[in-house]
Amino acid sequence: MNILICLMLFYFSANAQTQDSLHSKQETEDNVKYPQLQIKGLFQARYLVGMNKDVDVNGLHHNDGSGTNNNFMVKYMRVQVRAQISKRTEVVALANLADFKNDPKSRVLENAYLKYTFNPKLAFTVGQFRPWFGIEETYPIDIIKSLDWSNQYTEFGKLGWTSFQIGISATGQLELGKIPFQYAVSVVNGNGKNQVNDNDDGKQYSTRLVFGLAKKYNLNLGINGGIGEVFGKKIYAVGVDFNSLVNFGSKWSLDMQLEGKQGTNHPLYFAVAPEIRPDNPDEYLIRGAYFLPNLRYEINHRNLSAFELSCRYEYLDTNFRLNSNPRQTITPMFGLEFLKNYGARIQLGVQFDRYKHSIANTTQYNNNLFIVQVQSRF
């Protein structure tokens, strides 16, 4: 009898504590004041030295020997404002003030979107954002493992599949049995950022699916596919990628990325005179791939957090069916991290570009570029 009374008292006590805990949590949520503002930023600057005669720091060949073979530049001066205006709604604005050095009409403003999250399985993003169509869309430039975005990311951004686009996207996380699964479905104009209007009635529809295959090695498989219409012509893009993070004890880790894409190069197709242009834009196809291993050692010293070694190999052919001239790029980089989470770091590296055919007075010319890059996140 005494045991029964003790068990009943324990149950009611535990239940009361649980209710108090839930009530306390609800009160905490109800007492949150909105909007909540968060401001972040990134400064990134470079010093570039061209190592080939008559090739400038932008990779352009000059027959007459002109061109600049060394340059200080500010690549990014980003400011991001994130406003949590309710429990489920956030508004984000991101601007790169360094783009004022160019014609700012279609630059400067990068992210400008509203995101509404129903639950972890479903969220909608509307505005100007980066639709998921590969590994590189899932992280910002300030934690990139190499010098810059891959060549294929840049080119597929021009095609409307990656980089900043205007449209709507649905994203979420769930599980297929025991397999973690992420998805993104996007509809965008496909003509880049900061455009007043779409340049035609067509839209580009893309999907990204990510499957967690091996938890021990943090191995993920990504599958990307998209279809669209540009000036009445059907276009497509497909891609597949793998990424993995292997930890060797508490200090050493190896991050690996492998990605490949192929799609219609419709800007190149529409650049051809209508009288000689084929009916099928898929005569003009782009194909690219890259492999990026990054070895990291955590030092955790007072003045030095970690160092990294990476070497990215890239292959890109922007018109492999009709006028193939593949570009191969190798970029070894060494980085020192002075504050955690890339808060402050310096990188040194060399970018080696090789073309099947070097074409005079164009950027399709063999060259080597030495880079020193510094950055700070705040």
Image (spheres, rainbow, N blue to C red):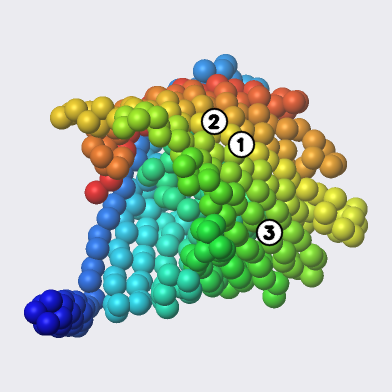
Label 3 neighbourhood size at 10 Å, few (<14), some (14-19), many (20+)? many
**Tag 3, which secondary structure?**
strand
Three-letter amino acid code at disc 2?
A: Arg
Which residue is denoted by mark 1 in the rendering?
290
Three-letter amino acid code at disc 3?
A: Gly
- Pointer 1 with pointer 2, Cβ within 8 A: yes
Three-letter amino acid code at disc 1?
A: Tyr
Q: Nearer the viewer, residue 59 or 78?
A: 78
Which residue is denoted by mark 3 in the rendering?
225
Q: Quadrant of the N terminus?
A: bottom left
Q: What's the distance in space between the residues labelled 1 and 2, CA to CA?
A: 7 Å
Q: Nearer the viewer, residue 199 or 187?
A: 187
Q: Is residue 85 left or right of residue 208?
A: left
Tell me which residue sits at (66%, 34%) in the image: 315
Residue 251 in which image quadrant:
top left
Tell me which residue sits at (82%, 38%) in the image: 323
- Disc with the residue nearer the chain's start (3 vs 1): 3
- Pointer 2 with pointer 3, Cβ within 8 A: no
- Count every numbered label the image shows and give the total: 3
Marker disc for residue 43? none
Q: Give above or below for 312 relative to 98.
A: above
Q: What's the distance in space between the residues labelled 2 and 3, CA to CA?
A: 24 Å
Which residue is denoted by mark 2 in the rendering?
312
**Tag 2, which secondary structure?**
strand
- Disc with the residue nearer the chain's start (1 vs 2): 1
Q: Nearer the viewer, residue 159 or 121?
A: 121
Label 1 neighbourhood size at 10 Å, few (<14), some (14-19), many (20+)? many
